[in-house]
Amino acid sequence: MIRYFLAQEIKLKAEYVSPVVESYDVGLLINVAKEVFRKARKPDNGAAIEKMLSQFHQSNEHRKRVAHGLWVPFKEGGTVHYVPRNKLTSKRFTEQAKELEKEADRLLELRSKLEEAFFGGY
């Protein structure tokens, strides 16, 4: 969704969306989107979008564990073993099933608010 609205905001032609916007990892995507929307929108709308994008960026740590970790779903409420790139030391997270359900609910609510802000206009 963020990629789509960013491409729309900068009026990126469809043929350039993949090589430009889809090449960003989540962290870079969020930073670029915050900068673009802050500059392109009225101050109130730009600030609201920037704040929500920052909240989404905080969730990226959960996403990285899910996407890049080793899951053991039947152990201790869902255990994830994850090695962060910047530390190279394995970390173990337990009770992740419940935690991820809460995070998914929070992100659904955030997405709804973010879409409202994107459509909130200039």
Image (cartoon, grey):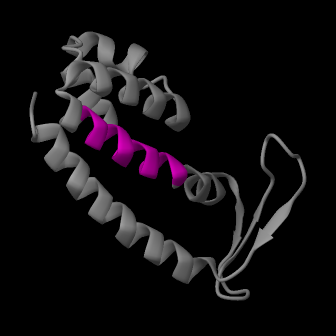
Relative height, residue 67 to residue 118 (above, below): below
User: In this rendering, is residue 67 above or below 103?
Assistant: above
On the picture, is 116 further left or further right than 12? left
Residue 79: percent from the left, percent from the top? 71, 77
**Rendered position, 31 above or below 49:** above
Residue at 41% across, 14% down: 19
| Residue drawn at (36%, 72%) of the image | 105
Residue at 52%, 28% in the rendered image: 28
Left or right of 59 in this view: 33: left
Q: Is residue 68 magenta?
A: no
User: Residue 46: x and y, percent?
Assistant: 25, 32
Q: Residue furthest right?
A: 89
Is 49 magenta? The answer is: yes
Picture quarter containing residue 75?
bottom right
Closer to the camera, 113 or 91? 113
| Residue 30 horizontal/vertical position (percent) | 44, 34
Q: Residue 115: percent from the left, percent from the top? A: 19, 47
The residues colored magenta run 46-58
